[in-house]
Amino acid sequence: MIGKMFRISIFGESHGKGVGVVIEGCPPGIEVNVRDIALELSKRRIDDPEISTQRREKDDFHILSGIFNGYTTGAPIVIFIENRDVDSSNYEEIKDTPRPSHADYTARIKYFGYNDYRGGGMFSGRITASIVAAGAIAKKVLAKYNIEVYAHTYSVGEISIPEDTSITRIKEETYKSPVRCADPESSKKMYELIKKVRREGDSIGGVVEAIALNVPPGLGEPPIDTLEGEISKAMFIIPGVKGIEFGRGFKLTRMKGSEANDPFVIKDEKILTEKNNSGGINGGISNGMPIILKVGFKPTPSIYKSLKTVNITMKKEEYIRLRGRFDPCIAIRAVPIVENMLAIVLTDHLMRWLSWIEYMS
Amino acid sequence: MIGKMFRISIFGESHGKGVGVVIEGCPPGIEVNVRDIALELSKRRIDDPEISTQRREKDDFHILSGIFNGYTTGAPIVIFIENRDVDSSNYEEIKDTPRPSHADYTARIKYFGYNDYRGGGMFSGRITASIVAAGAIAKKVLAKYNIEVYAHTYSVGEISIPEDTSITRIKEETYKSPVRCADPESSKKMYELIKKVRREGDSIGGVVEAIALNVPPGLGEPPIDTLEGEISKAMFIIPGVKGIEFGRGFKLTRMKGSEANDPFVIKDEKILTEKNNSGGINGGISNGMPIILKVGFKPTPSIYKSLKTVNITMKKEEYIRLRGRFDPCIAIRAVPIVENMLAIVLTDHLMRWLSWIEYMS
Amino acid sequence: MIGKMFRISIFGESHGKGVGVVIEGCPPGIEVNVRDIALELSKRRIDDPEISTQRREKDDFHILSGIFNGYTTGAPIVIFIENRDVDSSNYEEIKDTPRPSHADYTARIKYFGYNDYRGGGMFSGRITASIVAAGAIAKKVLAKYNIEVYAHTYSVGEISIPEDTSITRIKEETYKSPVRCADPESSKKMYELIKKVRREGDSIGGVVEAIALNVPPGLGEPPIDTLEGEISKAMFIIPGVKGIEFGRGFKLTRMKGSEANDPFVIKDEKILTEKNNSGGINGGISNGMPIILKVGFKPTPSIYKSLKTVNITMKKEEYIRLRGRFDPCIAIRAVPIVENMLAIVLTDHLMRWLSWIEYMS
Amino acid sequence: MIGKMFRISIFGESHGKGVGVVIEGCPPGIEVNVRDIALELSKRRIDDPEISTQRREKDDFHILSGIFNGYTTGAPIVIFIENRDVDSSNYEEIKDTPRPSHADYTARIKYFGYNDYRGGGMFSGRITASIVAAGAIAKKVLAKYNIEVYAHTYSVGEISIPEDTSITRIKEETYKSPVRCADPESSKKMYELIKKVRREGDSIGGVVEAIALNVPPGLGEPPIDTLEGEISKAMFIIPGVKGIEFGRGFKLTRMKGSEANDPFVIKDEKILTEKNNSGGINGGISNGMPIILKVGFKPTPSIYKSLKTVNITMKKEEYIRLRGRFDPCIAIRAVPIVENMLAIVLTDHLMRWLSWIEYMS
């Protein structure tokens, strides 16, 4: 479970009955219709076979509880997304030869060999559908406070989006791009790169940037539940994430204080900062500026090249070749996941903050 | 509170009575003596005025509960570290003019002006002493399983340690270096850089790397409590952290799968990986290889240059000049904090894992 | 969520799609077959229309995740029990007139009128099916340590079971009795009493006793997570519970220390207590004796007599008459719920305890 | 830790340095002065040697963090109460012979013999001082909403207070009575009874009733965090508690629905219930009526009579005689503890509820 007031648990496996999410603590009266969730889920789909080889399933989902007459009731909400387009035949043969940099080996240890290894089981990207479904509701909760959450592909391999890409562009262009990149030129280059690595039977990493607008100052509960820490913990739930940074992130480690600092200014009677190197968070608490963070994804470990591994039963080294469908770049598919995960964490911290707002009023 | 089985809460302020830590769930029978904790606390001290201007206090601490006859009892342990060398005179005058990129402004909003603003209050680096004290005990818990935890300065500004710096060197040299850098040559360069920025009245960022050896495979509880996510949440408790990455981290985002993957090999009948790009974690679970992570620190926001800010009461822009003692590079002082925070999180996950080990045996 | 290592969340409504449970932290390798769960669920059924007017549904359930090839995988387990025999027609008319001593009024306030009021919604006894399903798995986890859990009807109204009813009898007779009472004579009297109150259009309260055998000493985590406190919190999840006591419970409040104390004795080289007034728990920790507790259920608030209430919309007092099917005595139907809830809490604390056992070994 | 928004952890031992409490999530701006806490702590003291043989210490306490300029800051608050009047000489000799019905034996098992056994260690009534200190602050938080919390001795042995004792009397008389009984006549009888059992070298049990007034409807978070369940878990933290019941509690188990139900009425435009058999809670949520509960305390297990126990090292049965100071009736000393524990839980649930109130407004 993540969250304290708005809480999320996820479940399910790639080749089992399906995947799902439990949302506890969602306030009542949030209008939720099937289209909202379907729309959000559809963002996970990239239909271009040159850069994505995802399942062709329709993400049929069922609201099992917590919604009545089109509104959240305040009771736990469960959304279940059925698995359909499942082919488990390729997995039996590699059961004993864990795929490098996958969770196959660690899962085998952790679960003493009882884990559902088909299609990565609980470690499959498939489970992220449940995060998106929950995020669809979180966004509705945030909407009352005009909080908006976006994500887009910041880089694929060495190709990055220009630093001056506007938020308007990000809002409007991201999901028009097959690689979820808001800048058309970079999008084209990323597309070509992914196509190329895919044809080589290889894969490539990437970075997803997320931005939240209109977040009021005050979210975050230091010393323990810093806003950065809470967002980070949530992001690492997404398969393939290996790094996260806020604002200028690791660039700040090479900067001087005089460059890095965000001077305060007054604009339209509001206290803002001139720059936003801090990514909207100071001392673990939102400062009213846009929250900006980058999530780094490793390249898909499943590639079509020969892979060196170990046969666990035979205790000897071996080479395997994977069959099946693999995304050459998981980063681009993770864009809506990062976006919705951020919405989930912000909703929790908004709900915590409202308690104090009400008490102090 | 962080942790489930081995749990930590911290408290205290920079200019109040002191800072402290509550440890719950620590197994009984861990031998703890005052020297262990004192030794760990002493690692926080850098006595060279050219690069550090820390308080001159001795970190007098009191064990308030949970230790009896030199051993942990299994009851909650509280360690309290008194504040001594406190001068609060400089803070009153800047009460209304929040220091840029500090927590002054967000704290004021979050706590409706009631926060203890003296010396940064609960946001001061001072509170990290409590983490170190808890880590001293965590390390003792880990010792039974031969798990060792290290940290060192990976970079200051643009100066990085050579990639091939050996673990032996890190073990032996780190705390001999005034900048906690295991490579003598880099250490010298970092030292000069910090000295220079300090003389300019400025500050500089840096990166701390942490390494855990002999971590058994199986630690981490996905889908929610991934080992990376749990470590990340804990690291962001440390003031000044703006990014974290595991293994090759963000470098992986620019790599192909064929380079990034960690092929399995057998060495001395053990299953290992040839490289360790994953930083010892796959699918959120430790894989038996060293756990490696980097934590990015921003430059100290407190510098001696004129700072643009806003007078909150008067609602107008203003320039301030800080007086007092500031570290020009918090990264180097954070080395023992990162090290001990990693020990704390690993202890919690070790204790969780042992439950299943025992059950399955 | 209850639990730390073995964790349970429940969801669902009486007249929605169904009810269900999420189990997190269940160790892998527990053999679970559909019959185990079906058998446990069948204990909720009392087919005698003279004393029970329950739904006629078959409790069709689906394992949505976490079980693979007949064994738990270590991943979150979700069991969903569909609603079938649902008639919501009677509820619209009483929407504005909350039933006395029901959750109708408080739910309306708490959920700002958005709650699913049909059939009690999330407050219906229906949701307890999910607890039973989870308990079926918890019992399997406990079985490895020979821990057994039982419950039976201790009293209905003024009729109590004889104090000397043996545990053998409780094991063998409880579910043969339509009122879940292990003593045939008391069973008959309880049956007649329930029949009588039902014919009067009334209902009656009762007490369920639960017993756990072979619980090792050491379960419970004081000072906060006492075993009694953890069991209590869980029991109050069951609708209709208004009291709980351990061992001799409230009778101890009228006893002297010299009577109440449980002297230690040695039997077969084991340290036991002569009596078990403490109900197997001292200082919040299990002492190795049977854990014994009683859970008090109020009479079903839904009765066929005229009920005085308030029309919330019209803001005036009103009398209502309920239609529909109501159990005249919820206590007897709660026997398997109490039993399985106890199994769930003990499993969590067993798993916590095993961590220390392994560490100290 | 108990609580989610307003959170409490306690620590300390009877004969160690002291006992204390950590309060996290307390809203800022609550005026707290030393006298408030001292006054609350003084309620624990009963100076009559005929019925109480408590320590003569003054409960010197230190606020270690979280209060600044007389107000809560929003940061974690720690209050530490020093031990003074400590005589540990009597405990060494009984180290191997656990006192019946005490935590000696279970603590020895749980903590593998490392527990601080002096004076009961962490199981001593001494630790309840920390609850009272936290409650003093909780009451201040509640005061803004006019929520008041009271407790009084309901019964000692067979002597009960008259059912019609008014709340005014409870407010005014309780702490004037040496046995914390609001009815003068019952108080006298209880006093005599306790005196008598004390002279016999024995002890006696009792029941404490707690009442909360002006609790708004809506507190409690079912299905898991029912208000009754949360209060219960908290109450079992208090040493000696063996049962809890809400409203008419176990009496409801002997009642019919037609008697037990609380019909709704309108008074002064407010929706109330005619009776309050439910104790102010339905469906796990407060209904706006006074919250009423009873907590059952066993007789002090420490008595001056010969006690049968087992020498654990020698593995043989033995009789022991305790020396030292023991309260003949812990129930009467627990009155302020129950009162403050209730305040703590209600504060947490108030703060949770305010989040939704604010969101829905």
Image (cartoon, coloured by chain):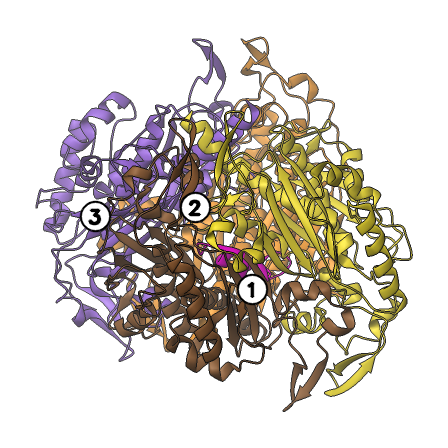
Chain colours: A yellow, B brown, C orange, D purple
Crowding at label 3, few (<14), some or many (≥20) Cα neighbours within 10 Å? some
According to the image, label 1 marks what residue?
C142
Q: Is residue A298 visible?
A: no
Residue B260: x and y in percent read 72, 71
Circle 2 SS class: loop
Badge nearest the viewer, 1 or 3: 3
Residue B125: x and y in percent read 37, 55
Above or below for D250 versus D65: above
Q: Is residue D219 left or right of residue A71?
A: left
Q: Is residue A345 visible?
A: yes
Q: CA distance from mark 3 to mark 2?
A: 30 Å
According to the image, label 2 marks what residue?
B102
Circle 1 SS class: helix
Residue D30: x and y in percent read 32, 33
In the image, the segment drawn in magenta is: B220-242
Q: Amino acid at mark 1?
A: Leu
